[in-house]
Image (cartoon, helix red, strand yellow):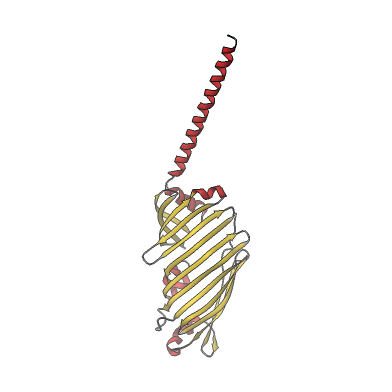
Amino acid sequence: MKFFPRLSFTRSSAAGKKSWRYIAFGLLAYIVFLLATLPASWLAWGLHRFGPHNISLTQPLGSVWRGQAILIAKQGSQLNRLGLIEWDLHPLWLFTGKLGANLRLKDDDTQASTDIKLGYKSITASRLAATLPANALGRFYAPVSLAAPEGTINIKGEELVLDQQGLHGQAIVQWRNAGSQLSPVKPLGDYRLTINGKGKSATFKLNTNKGALQLSGNGNWDIYGSGQLNFNGTATPRQRNSELESLLSLLGKDLGGGRRLLRLNTRTKPLKFP
């Protein structure tokens, strides 16, 4: 008889522990359900709250993990539609301390895709590939619109890393069938810009693949310091010189022999991690 109370207490304790396990499991399952069904509007809010001030998402559909929205870039008071962006987030990357996602941008004449990994004070873009019309560059840098560029821009990069040490990796930008409404010569040529991340700075090298107008030059961008971007190069007609003169006269100082100076000195906002 003396042992019955002790036996009864043990059973009650075991049942209580099981109850708490069921409750904890239920709460965990509920939290997982909430996370799995978060609407895409939460991602749009997060980008607006913590992302670049000139980029936003509108008309979000789907969930935080798989969805789509219209990507908008703000330039002054003007809003530019960049296209429909689709995303797939990879939850398993969270166990490595990073958030991984595949991003795809689509528009009538624009295609882009990349794999993004967000870590602690680092961003990695892998398998970057983009194709867009040359006149779309005016959405990001207004002075480009004055030249009314024509042709197609292709961008490729195997892996670009931006962290506290700077920018690392290489990207290739090709301008195919390049042209301008300021010149009767169409196309002007095919050009290649190589961008190399060197840590706190990045270098640029411009080459001509083919065409009537030869462009070449080198530049440097102080990413984390002053934000100063400098480029110096030349534009030299290879053929149809007289037809190119109207365009060349707008480019820069006459260096003789038909060559014109290409120079860009501007300052961007230095990149910083919080």
Note whether residue 24 is visible: yes
Q: Position of residue 21 (x, y in %)?
A: 52, 30
Q: Is residue 21 above or below residue 135?
A: above
> What residue sits 62% from the left and 58% below the top?
164
Determine the residue positioned at 51% across, 89% down. 258
Q: Is residue 224 left or right of residue 128?
A: right
Name, please, the residue furthest toward the left: 108
Is the residue 129 above or below the residue 16 in the image?
Answer: below
Nearer the observer, 107 or 136: 107
Could you say where residue 87 lies in the image, as x and y percent from the top left?
Answer: 44, 54
Q: Image point 42% across, 78% down: which residue?
A: 179
Q: Quadrant of the N terminus?
A: top right
User: Viewer-proximal residue, 129 or 137?
Assistant: 129
Query: How many labels were placed on the picture?
Result: 0
14 sits left or right of 85 in the view: right
> In which quadrant is the C terminus drawn?
bottom right
Q: Position of residue 251 (x, y in %)?
A: 50, 81
> In this orientation, does residue 141 appear?
no
Residue at the extreme top of the image, as rendered: 1
Q: Nearer the viewer, residue 219 or 10?
A: 10
The quarter of the picture where residue 2 lies is top right
Q: Residue at x 48, y 77 (%)?
A: 191
